[in-house]
Image (tube, rainbow, N blue to C red):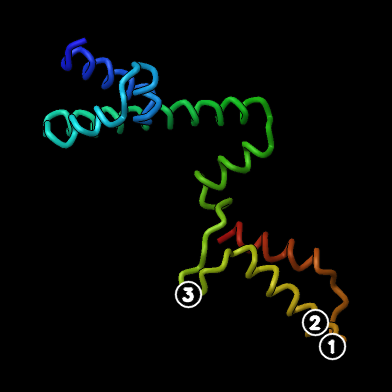
Amino acid sequence: MKKAKIAKQFLEELSKTPIISVACNKLGVSRQTIYKWKNFDHHFYNDVETHQKQGIQNINDLARSKIITHVNNGDLKACKYWLEKNDRDYSNEKLPDSGRPIDEIIVTICENKIKIDHENQEIDGSKEEYIKFFNDLKKNN
């Protein structure tokens, strides 16, 4: 096959599957050949970058659709994942000064508050009550 034909087929394949070695295997072309072309042909280099980005976007779209399908089917793990990535109220953001997840800090605060309250015999609230209180507080802010 001529270089132009192989290059065109390679770029089409790369748009579907953005992994150079996979595209090479499907076409029976060596990775060395593709990298050689990339090194010596600036236009081919740019085309590879463009098609690889398109392939990554296609795979990302596919992954999103799978997650949404699982959410629609009631998969709680998929629901949690989606909310953590797309809804600030459910995200596990890190505080800039500590780098610790907010939930971890809330649990630490609850545990410390329980210790102090029990030591002072001021309250006999459970850890779960404090966690619920702080989670409610977090959701309202």
Residue 115, label in figure: 2
Inspect the image, locate mark 1, and give the three-letter code of the amino acid beneath it.
Glu
Is the Cβ of the residue at disc 1 closer than 8 Å to that at disc 3? no
Q: Secondary structure at mark 1?
A: helix
3D distance between C-alphas at marks 1 and 3: 29 Å
Residue ID at (24%, 27%): 33
3D distance between C-alphas at marks 3 and 2: 25 Å
Is the Cβ of the residue at disc 1 closer than 8 Å to that at disc 2? yes
Residue placed most toward the observer, 90 or 50: 50
Residue wearing tag 3:
97
3D distance between C-alphas at marks 1 and 2: 6 Å
Q: Quadrant of the N terminus?
A: top left
Q: Is residue 111 left or right of residue 103?
A: right
Q: Position of residue 26 (x, y in %)?
A: 39, 17
Q: Secondary structure at mark 3?
A: loop
Q: Quadrant of residue 53?
A: top left
Residue ID at (63%, 70%): 105
Residue ID at (52%, 59%): 93
Inspect the image, locate mark 3, and give the three-letter code of the amino acid beneath it.
Asp
Residue wearing tag 1:
119
Q: Is residue 116 left or right of residue 26?
A: right
Q: Position of residue 68 (x, y in %)?
A: 55, 29
State which tag comes first along the sequence, 3 or 2.
3
Q: Position of residue 7 (x, y in %)?
A: 21, 19
Residue placed most toward the observer, 75 or 17: 17
Residue placed most toward the observer, 114 or 23: 23
